[in-house]
Image (tube, rainbow, N blue to C red):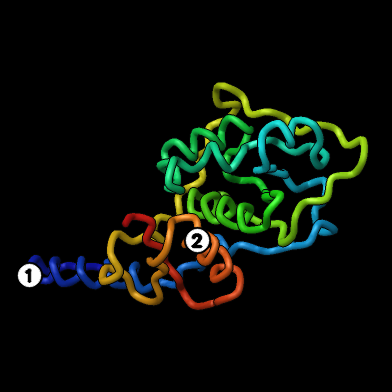
Amino acid sequence: MVCRRPCMRMFCGAAMLAAVAGAPAYAAGGAIAFIDQTRIDAQTRVVDVRDGKACERASLAGARCLPAADLFAVGGRPVGFHTLRWLLGTIGLSGNERVVVVAAEPGDAAAVGALLFLAGQREVAVLDRPVTISAGAPGGGNRNITRETVFTAPMRDRLLVAAPEQAIGAVIDSGPAVARLRRFARRAANDAQPVRLRLSP
């Protein structure tokens, strides 16, 4: 849309904003996938969000440890996205990788998977059952104290809203933040219709 007449600029700007707001939520970047363990291959980066000590003892091949507890403050509020994207850099993620999140509880994996997806991770899969670790498996790699790489993928911030009335389509905005993230992950995986999330109270 090109606005040539000065008197039309305000209308054109509003029309373009409405067009962006009403665009399908998953048009750029797909959705979250829920998978079983057989679909984890050598090209997939594994993020183990179990307790740090459990991950360090044994995990899947090539896994990096990023305990879910590091991503949520007291009361279950997620860390800010600036902090989250910095933390993802400490396990070597730039946002362009195919990532699978594994956990002792599938709900934890779903909540963290939703955060990674919103942060801009290109491909996010969630293990839809407790992770199975083979006897004698190597330990997962700890995150670095500094970033190994800079997470540069653009956030999917169009999927976040400050208030329900600001969004077009369904908004998940009830219950604790962790529960909202879990529901968002399921809807992003199973529903082609746009769904947005409100994390603030």
Locate residue 103 relative to residue 7 in the image: left or right: right
Which residue lies most toward the top here?
145
Assess disc 2: are there few (<14), some (14-19) or many (≥20) residues with their C-alpha within 10 Å of its C-alpha.
some
Where residue 7 sits: x, y (%)? 7, 70
Where residue 192 sits: x, y (%)? 54, 77
Residue drawn at point x = 72 percent, y = 44 percent: 46
Task: Give the amino acid at mark 1.
Answer: Cys
Question: Is 7 above or below relative to 144?
Answer: below
Residue drawn at point x = 11 percent, y = 69 percent: 5
Q: Which residue is mark 2?
A: 179
Q: Is residue 100 visible?
A: no
Which sits in the foreground, 1 or 19? 19
Locate residue 106 relative to residue 200 in the image: left or right: right
Residue drawn at point x = 9 percent, y = 65 percent: 6
Assess disc 1: are there few (<14), some (14-19) or many (≥20) residues with their C-alpha within 10 Å of its C-alpha.
few
The quarter in which the C terminus is drawn is: bottom left
The quarter of the picture where residue 3 lies is: bottom left
Task: Give the amino acid at mark 2.
Answer: Ala
Element at label 1: helix
Element at label 2: helix
Residue 197, numbered circle? none
